[in-house]
């Protein structure tokens, strides 16, 4: 299996622009998680899905953030409009049981 | 509330020396416990996990961890560290729900 795939690996954008991060989970996994990692706050859970349904989005920092999972093999995390404080590494992870999570390589987002 | 504490922000060991990374969890019952490793520019990779049973668990890359209920600890060990082990290590716990709590991480430096 190719593992969790994220794209793009790096994104540089200007403040106010829309950013879309993409994730393809491991086939057969029914949980998908989006995390954000920064030096200041470490690893934060933003939202997770079970069978394509959002279960807990309490970690989404603001209404500027939204996530979708239209099918079992694809999810997006969108930031609109983006701000410099959104600069971070965003990870997608998937799981079969919700306990053991398999992480993608991450997307490093820089908002200038 | 569930929490995970990694008391050491960073540790330096000599190549070939033994390693122990500390992790303490806070929860009334025994949670599921995990150690992940993150190499620079990479996502988190699961090293090992403890659900129940034998309190000494073996993982990949020669790592092991011991669960001690009396100390609420789940310390990670390796008898002989290699330079390639330099990375950040995260302890995590899950109480059987959907949310995994990660510690702040311990960065391991290996000196020649």
Image (cartoon, helix red, strand yellow):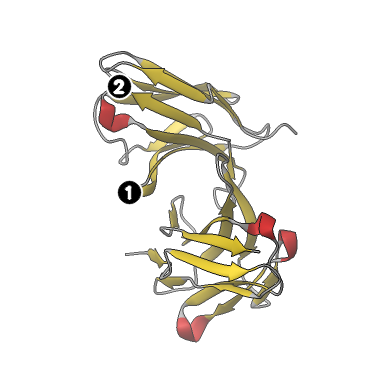
Image-based side of B19 in relation to A19, left or right: right
Height in image: B99 above or below B32?
Answer: above
| Residue A1, label in figure | none
Chain at numbered mark 2: A
Residue visible at 68% across and 35% down?
A3
Q: Residues within 10 Å of mark 1 (few under 14, many from 20)?
A: few
Image-based side of A2 in relation to A8, left or right: right
Q: Position of residue A83 (x, y in %)?
A: 26, 24
Which residue is under mark 1?
A41
Q: Residues within 10 Å of mark 2 (few under 14, many from 20)?
A: some
Which quadrant of the figure has residue B52? Answer: bottom right
Nearest the viewer among A18 and A66 is: A18
Q: Position of residue B50 (x, y in %)?
A: 61, 67
Give the structural element (helix, strand or loop) at label 2.
loop
- The alpha-carbon separation of the residues under discs 2 and 1 comes to 20 Å
Question: From where the camera sits, is residue B23 visible?
Answer: yes
Give the structural element (helix, strand or loop) at label 1.
loop
Residue visible at 56% across and 42% down?
B43
Q: Residue furthest bottom?
A: B70
Q: Which label's residue is closer to the chain start, 2 or 1?
A: 1
Kindly check if marks 2 and 1 are in contact, taking CB atoms under 8 A apart as contact: no
| Residue A112, label in figure | 2
Height in image: A63 above or below A80?
Answer: below
- The quarter of the rendered structure image containing the C terminus of chain A is top left
Height in image: B79 above or below A53?
Answer: below
Residue visible at 54% across and 61% down?
B108
């Amino acid at each position: 299996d190719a593992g969790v795939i994220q794209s793009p690996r790096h994104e540089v954008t200007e403040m106010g622009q829309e950013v879309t991060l993409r994730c393809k989970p491991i086939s057969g996994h029914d949980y998908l998680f989006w995390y954000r990692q920064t030096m200041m706050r470490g690893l934060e859970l933003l939202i997770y899905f079970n069978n394509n349904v959002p279960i807990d989005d309490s970690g989404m920092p603001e209404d500027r953030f939204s996530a979708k999972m239209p099918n079992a093999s694809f999810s997006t995390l969108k930031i609109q409009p983006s701000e410099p404080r959104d600069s971070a590494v965003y990870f997608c992870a998937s799981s079969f049981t919700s306990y053991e999570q398999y992480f993608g390589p991450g997307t490093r987002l820089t908002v200038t | 509330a569930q929490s995970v504490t990694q008391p050491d922000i960073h540790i330096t060991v000599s190549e070939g020396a033994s390693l122990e990374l500390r992790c303490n969890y806070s929860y009334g019952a025994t949670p599921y416990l995990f150690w992940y490793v993150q190499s620079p520019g990479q996502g988190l990779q699961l090293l090992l996990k403890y659900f129940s049973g034998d309190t000494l668990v073996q993982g990949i890359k020669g790592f092991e961890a011991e669960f001690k209920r009396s100390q609420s600890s789940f310390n990670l060990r390796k008898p002989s560290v290699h330079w390639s082990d330099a990375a950040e290590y995260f302890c995590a716990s899950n109480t059987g729900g959907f949310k995994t709590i990660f510690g702040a991480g311990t960065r391991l430096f290996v000196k020649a």
